[in-house]
Image (cartoon, grey):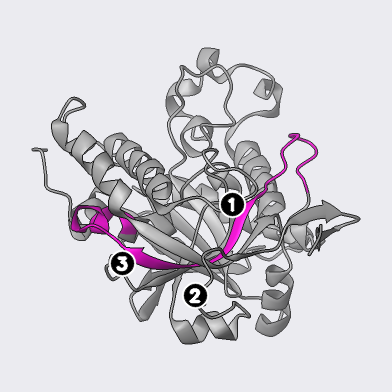
Amino acid sequence: MASMVPTVESLWCSLLVSRIRWTVSGALSESRALQDVCGLEMPSLRSRLGKHIRRSVCPEIKWQDECGSCSRMGDCLWPRMLPGSAVGLPAPAPLASWLLTMDQGRLLSTHFHLDPMEFRVFGRALDDAFADALGLDRRRSGADPRWLRPILMDGEATHPLLPLAWAAPVPMSPPPPPLAAGRRLRFHVPLDLKTANHSSPPPMGDWLRLGRNRVHRLVTQNGFFIWPKEDPRWSHLSREANGASWHWIQARHGTPWKPLLKYRIELTGWMGAVHIDQLPDAWLPWATLLPIVGVGSHIPYGCGLASTLTSESIRGQGCEPETSEPHPRIIPLKWQDGFATKTGG
């Protein structure tokens, strides 16, 4: 593919994005199941999902082997679907081709270059992980245990994806509307850029540069090409990021989830809402994709994602309206006794 001038559509098509909404079917009522889903913790669900993906593709006798030396490496889906969990792979490991999130009571999965076989494995494993997380085991019955139903998100319309059709490529979802100055974002999960400290939220320029690097890696993994590594347009784009700015309407540093003690990971970061004050034209295509693609650390566990908001929706979610104060209201949080609690103020 020749070098391209990035647009929202060209980057989206290079990422080959399919967004799936998972709804509940079967014996459980929709209202009860969705209420239970809202209480799920994404890191825990993601950990269970990884366990069931591995069980479905890797013989238990090989679980302790290094993937890089495994005789089944060539046709195994495990290192392709969870490259960060596979062991013995050449560094740097590729990025996972999917992510999972909860947004406004909806369980969503986003896939980049979705392979039909991988999607079948993903759907089965997610169904098992969902049952585990709710303390239910529907596999004991003689009927098909599937009770999650995938629906392709296609703008305002949705299209159910029947299991029998999963052998064919899953269609792409349309790109989101462009992000521009004056728009607002809500970070409902921790944003950890590693470049920021715990006393002040990260600037927009850092978010843009790190997000661009992630998008570029995903595009390259899909076999597409933007600019050569030495192309001066990369450095020009980085300088343009200095002209981007946002201000935090409300900000808090902490986590809504329990620590992943098994992995010794505490998923903390900045949460809240931002208003975009300035966004250079060169960054518009990249910034439009970042809320969906994710930015920062621990993205596979549900961190680094955002959603676009209007002023009315921000107020409806308890975020403070804009003020003339130079600094946002900061609410420090920490995990204690099973709850994310304020540490002061």
Check disc 1 and report the residue beneath it: 200
Sequence-wise, which precedes: disc 1 or disc 3? Answer: 3
Whether residue 259 is visible to the viewer of this picture, yes or no, is yes
Instruction: Identify the image quadrant of the C terminus.
Output: bottom right
Report the span colored magenta: 259-287
Q: Nearer the viewer, mark 1 or mark 2?
A: 2
Instruction: Identify the image quadrant of the N terminus.
Output: top left
C-alpha separation, residue under disc 1 versus residue under disc 3: 24 Å
What's the amino acid at mark 3?
Leu
Quick one: label 1, few (<14), some, or many (20+) residues within 10 Å? some
Image location of residue 17, percent across then percent down: 34, 56
Q: In this view, does 74 lie to the left or right of 320?
A: left
**Residue at 55% across, 63% down:** 327
What's the amino acid at mark 1?
Ser
Q: Is residue 32 above or below residue 301?
A: below
Check disc 2 and report the residue beneath it: 324
**Residue at 35% across, 38% down:** 213
Whether residue 27 is visible to the viewer of this picture, yes or no, is no
Q: Which of 289 and 98 is in front in this view?
A: 289
**Residue at 38% across, 55% down:** 290
What's the amino acid at mark 2?
Ser
